[in-house]
Amino acid sequence: MARAAPLTPAERRTTLLVAARAVFADRGYHRASVADLIEAAGVARGTFYHHFESKRDVFAAVLGALMLDVVASVAPIDVTGDVAAQVHANLRAITRAFAAEGDAVRILFTDAQSVDADGEQALAAFYAHALARVERALSTGQALGIVRPGETRQAARCLLGLLKEPVMQARLAHEPLDADAVAGAIFGLLTHGLLVDPT
């Protein structure tokens, strides 16, 4: 029987990242050890240190990849098409991305800011990027006459909160995240609001 070809350095690094993501999601940054990461990846200690300098180093790589995955789930809006349908589709896509990650969201929303100043800066950069993207979308919508006029920065922050809170609340309650229900609720708030016009 032929032996499987050895993993390339890039494949070995990916294996380490996948294992580290699972360990950090399960145990959290502070409770996870390098030994846990090595055991989960099934590699030697030397292999780990060939790819990463420390637990903090691999955590930064996991955090960066997680941020990219979340950002990549959102498609640019084609303003010549049905904008409302695309907004709803993006809401479903991003909430499904969070649901698919399961407990990995703790890495993004909890652990990143509690690790150290670098983790907090990485999280701040992620939010700044997301905020700028939502603000641009709101400004474009205003220019097209499909978003009400008004200040966009706080509106963008509120929209990010509408996404973040259901994810965190589900995690804290140990409930599965119903991505489609969350997306539908947010879309309903965006399109119809909550209050009934008494007139």
Image (tube, rainbow, N blue to C red):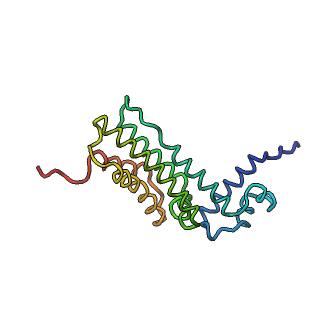
Does residue 7 appear left or right of residue 125 in this picture? right
* Residue at the extreme right: 1
Q: Quadrant of the N terminus?
A: top right
Q: How many numbered discs sit on the rendered protein?
A: 0
Residue 16 left/right relative to 63: right
The image quadrant of residue 30 is: bottom right
In the foreground, 145 or 100: 145
- x%, y% of residue 68? 56, 47
Q: Residue at x 44, y 53 (%)?
A: 178
**Picture residue at 50% right of the left edge, 52% below the top:** 98
- Residue 162 position in % (x across, y down): 38, 55
Measuring from the top left, give residue 100's x and y in whole percent.
Answer: 54, 51
Horizontal arrangement in the rendering, residue 46 relative to residue 19 (left or right):
right
**Residue extending farthest left:** 199
Q: Nearer the viewer, residue 146 or 85?
A: 146
Extreme residue in the top direction: 80
